Amino acid sequence: MLLSIVVYFIPIIIAIVLHEVAHGYTAWILGDDTAKRLRRLSLNPIRHIDLFGTLILPALLLLSQTGIVFGWAKPVPVDFSRLSSPKRDTILVASAGIVMNILLAVISAGLLKLTPLISSQLVQGIVALFLINMVVFNIVLAVFNALPIPPLDGSKILFGWSSDLRVQKFLDSARAGSVFIIFVAFILPVICRYFGFEFNPFGWYLIKTSQYFISLLI
């Protein structure tokens, strides 16, 4: 049990927490100190944990062996109107979490190549599995957040520069976007299997795209 927590859940927590801290820290540098004032730049995972998105969902996905493991933390609050250049900086803040996850994946892949230097086979295996999961979870989280669906980062990266009221209304539709993601990711595949055929576009995108980028690293 303890070993599972170390090699599976700690990489998930690191990936999710640093993703959110990257958003808040970038916003602070660019003029908005909301996250700093609310103490959300902390590396303490308790300040970022979302009960369902950080703990329950990843655990269910691991136990169900779906081949997909992802999650989310409580979003770091950002007042985009306080940024130095709101149109440009919105894209930079939104990109920061994905960039952080890619950076963590690259660093973990580099450290993985050094594990043969560890003399103990047991320790080497544990460290290697931890680092492999760091690569996998960070890439999956980056790929997931790149989707252009509110409230995911991809929607702000793609449309954050626009002041069009219709675009802003779309970006503000976080609840509808979350419902859409849950429907496409979990409910639609079950319905399709019930009628005798496989249709899981969310899973195909997440698995195939993640596998491609992971293969570049390990």
Image: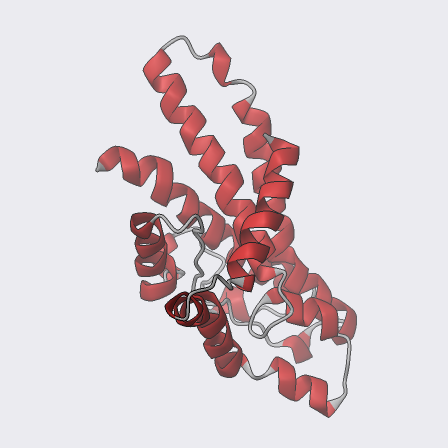
- Quadrant the N terminus occupies: top left
Q: Residue at x 62, y 54 (%)?
A: 98
Q: Residue at x 56, y 20 (%)?
A: 113
User: Toward the viewer: 8 or 34?
Assistant: 8
Extreme bottom residue here?
165
Q: Residue at x 44, y 66 (%)?
A: 189
Extreme front residue here?
196
Q: Residue at x 49, y 70 (%)?
A: 184
- Quadrant the C terminus occupies: top right
- x, y percent for residue 64: 31, 52
The reply to whether residue 29 is in sight is no
Extreme top residue here?
119
In this view, 164 is above or below 30: below
Relative side of 30 to 76, left or right: right
Relative side of 134 to 212, left or right: left
In this view, 197 is above or below 113: below
The image's colour scheme reads secondary structure
User: Toward the viewer: 76 or 166?
Assistant: 166
User: Toward the viewer: 169 or 20?
Assistant: 169
- x, y percent for residue 17: 46, 53
In this view, 7 is above or below 56: above
- x, y percent for residue 173: 56, 84
- x, y percent for residue 210: 58, 47
User: Toward the viewer: 19 or 115?
Assistant: 115
The reply to whether residue 150 is in sight is yes
In this view, 26 is above or below 109: below
